[in-house]
Image (cartoon, coloured by chain):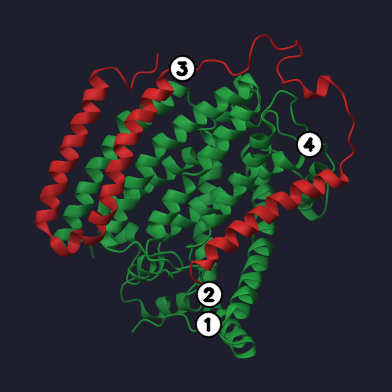
Amino acid sequence: MRLLLTYSFSSLSSHIHAWLISSMGDGMAALVAEMVIVGISLIVFLVPLCFFLGYMERKVAAFMQLRLGPNRVGPKGSMQIVADTVKLLFKEGLTPTASDKFLFNLAPVIVVVTSMLVMAPIAFAKDFQIWDLSIGVLYVTSISSIAVIGILMAGWSSYNKYSLLGAMRSGAQIVSYELSIGLSILSVIVLTGSLKMSDIVMSQQNGWWIFKGHLPMWISFVIFVIASTAEINRAPFDLTEAEQELTAGFHTEYSGMKFAMFLLSEYINLFVVSAIAATLFLGGWMPFHIGHWELFNHIMDFIPSSIWFMGKTFFIIFIIMQFRWTFPRLRVDQLLTLEWKYLLPISMVNILLATLIAIMGWHF
Amino acid sequence: MGPAALILLAICGIAFAGGGILLSRALAKKSANVVKGEPYECGIPTTGTSWIQFHVGYYLFALIFLVFDVELVFMYPWAVVVQKIGMTAFAEIIIFMFILFMGLLYAWKKGALKWM
């Protein structure tokens, strides 16, 4: 018999919910109070997360290049990113005179809001989601594609040739790779038969899809990781902000806190994409189990579900960070060739294979 | 939480981004200078308009994307029910994908996927 986790965040969240209902009644007041609590805890979670990802990125980069990385401010240089944030906070935010000022100031807000909205259906732990909506995965793919509007807006309104070219490249890249992402997500949906995040995680109770689904799941996992690296404009697909060609791409003209917002949303998107990959292919918060090894499974059950989720997510984040220092940047024609002539046909065939497995019941 | 989560997250995002930018505006030292407002290029004042023409290839890729994105929207409901319907759904999606794949091959043949 497999024991599911006995302790998790779900009891905490349901306790708070019950307490709010009992003290304020089942009306508007309780809802507003709950929203305030969720909002504050989300921001309290996200800011250290972005700081940590920034620190991690520098350290991973440093160790891959046999450097030490930041090591002056705070223990092991961990406060460096805080110092940088304070520096950015005190920088003057310039707006080019000829730019479209309204769109220029709106773009960073849109980019941050979209990356916030995508957080809604992510299952952080057992029964611990902001909103477990029935079309979770579809919601994530549709909302995340709004981000491209923010990027195009930033590039267009800057009144800068570098920005415009960077934004156009980014637009072409994001819309192209969205197709591969969609198809590799669909090959999991075919097996689970539900778009709901909690259902997808529960379907992996007796094994993660990457193990249960044979070869097609491996192919979709690899395609998903490649395409989502492109989707969030990270190296080797970062030719929207190729320093040697375009200075900084669509955020050339941004400085100070507005620039920090683009950086922040990049890190939130990195986390979200890795979290989705962990949920779809690596079982989300499900512990790792091996067939009939009762003792092993029992020990694995004692690790809290949130740690499982974070561990898997950070594993994928680490892989994506390694890409940056492993592969050279692609040219724009190579980028589009990779998507349209390789990844898209492969993922179209792959989804048919996954469907065959699902209908025949060949998965474990 | 229900759909209220969307309002909450939107408010969070706006408060976070807007708050940060406004805080920075309040704290940062400002100085006015004509050169500061010029677009950043290479030091020399920029010539002509910055809203330049760009490659038509972007437009072509956007059009092909549109075709396949609509395909994806059709495939989401199909993916949810395919296990219940079984082989019929599989046969149908093979026909559907075949037609789309022919479209991709046509675009390929016509050189729409080639970056000049």
Q: CA distance from mark 1 to mark 2?
A: 7 Å
Q: Please, what secondary structure does the residue beneath circle 3 have?
A: loop
Residue type, label 2: Pro
Residue at x 47% of width, y 75% of height: A127
Q: CA distance from mark 4 to mark 2?
A: 43 Å
Q: Residue furthest bottom?
A: A22
Q: Please, what secondary structure does the residue beneath circle 2 have?
A: loop
Q: Are marks 4 and 2 on the same chain?
A: yes
Residue A252, image x, y percentages: 67, 28
Quadrant (top left/top right/bottom left/bottom right) for the C terminus of chain A:
bottom left
Q: CA distance from mark 1 to mark 4?
A: 47 Å
* Residue of label 2: A304
The 10 Å Cα crowd at callout 2, few under 14, some 14 to 19, many 20 or more, is some
| Chain with green colouring | A
* Residue of label 4: A93
Residue type, label 4: Gly
Q: CA distance from mark 2 to mark 3?
A: 52 Å
Of the pair A39 and A236, the residue shown nearer to us: A39
Q: Are marks 3 and 1 on the same chain?
A: no
The 10 Å Cα crowd at callout 4, few under 14, some 14 to 19, many 20 or more, is many
Chain where mark 1 sits: A
Q: CA distance from mark 3 to mark 4?
A: 31 Å
